[in-house]
Amino acid sequence: MTAKRLGKDLASTTQLAVTNSLAHRGWEVTIVAPKGSASQQSSLSNALDKDESRSKHAFFEVRRSRKPGLGWLTFGSNLKKMLPGVINEGDFDVALVEWQAVAGSHKALTQFNIPWLIVDRSPPVFRSIVGRLQWFEYRRAYKLASKNGVAGSVPKSQALAEWNRRHKRIIEPVIILEAGVDVSRFKPSNFNGKPTIIHHGQLDKERKIMRLVNIGSLIAARGIDFKMRIAGSGNCLTELQKTATQHEWLEVLGPLPSEQIPQFLSSGHVALFPLPDGEIWRLASPLKVREWAAAGLPMILSNITPHKSIGDRSWVKLVEHNAPLEEWANQVEELLNADLVSIGRMARIDAENEFDWQQTTESLHLKLTELAGL
């Protein structure tokens, strides 16, 4: 159960990937979530049905308001009404419940004696009025889970588990579900054409995303012939698009359907992510970094906890998050002059061996098997 609009939200790729990974292991998965537009739902169906011979899925829609601040309220209320009927129609052994769905689901799960795990892909990011409402719901979800027989928690990183432990809301046992990647979807970059810097993800001011443009301007001032391609959605998208009209080297594409992301990444030579060192980012699991590795992209990242968690890799250059932009530009220039083919090949090999969803979901699969008594 998730409050993400599957087929629309960038973060929904995780839910879809976990669903397919579990289905490939023999689980029959029922998704209970809001849905996007007809075209987005078509993309969702394609993602779920890409391997019909090995997987079975069902989808139940929960209505969710699109008005800011009302989404989680309406989602929880509608989930509470419809879930008993969904459970009555199926034969369920265990449930995965994202924290946004706990308030609307815990009573039905208890009533039907279904063991469940609370899934935490991220605490609320923003500190606005809407963000404060989400923080209230986040804390409430953990309290409700603790009081209503939850069987454990599934945070996205060890850092997030430790953070919740410090705030005395951790729920044991903890099953870490690191961000993974479906490596087979990605074709490694061939590094042909004009040197291209790539970034894909949430384009928010909280992530200081305009630093990408500032770094690009420094590189352009050095007379280097390159291109920077940025894709994603967020509160900086409009500003980025306006800025792109002023620079020939900058291209801003906006949000991309998930099936177009691998092709977008394969057009790049180097990935760049100067993420700041905010508390929320320290708790993250570096999904984008793993996707970039699957595309065989060398990368330059800020030296913060989630990026350091990748380990010492030949294809990663870490720069202090508050370093002068000149230092970032220096690292980009140095990497563009390196043997990108060899470096990218190592990134791809590591992605195949360590970052595929089949590896990252193994602990979760074992715990679900235990809870289901299989």
Image: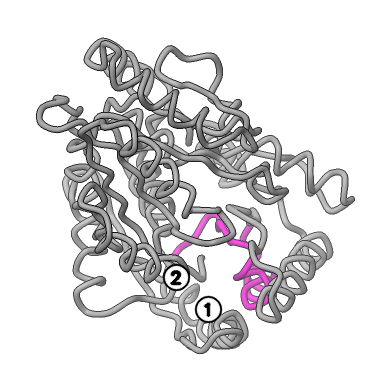
Q: What range of the chain is rendered magenta?
A: 91-115
Number of numbered discs present? 2
Q: Position of residue 116 (x, y in %)?
A: 63, 56
Q: Nearer the viewer, mark 2 or mark 1?
A: 2
**Which residue is located at x 65 percent, y 37 percent?**
322
Quarter of the rendering containing residue 177: top right
Decide whether residue 94 is among the magenta residues. Answer: yes
Amino acid carrying label 2: it is: Val
Q: Which badge, 2 or 1, comes first in the chain's sequence?
A: 2
Q: Quadrant of residue 163?
A: top right
Which of the two residues, 119 or 269, is positioned nearer the viewer here?
269
Residue at numbered disc 1: 83
Q: Is residue 362 above or below residue 242?
A: above
Question: Which of the 4 image quarters holds residue 124?
Answer: bottom right
Q: Label 2: which residue?
A: 32
Instruction: Tell me, yes or no, whether the two marked residues, 2 and 1, touch with CB atoms within 8 Å.
Output: yes
Nearest the eye: 143 or 283 = 283
Q: Measure the alpha-carbon separation of dots 2 and 1.
A: 8 Å
Is 231 placed above or below 290 here?
below
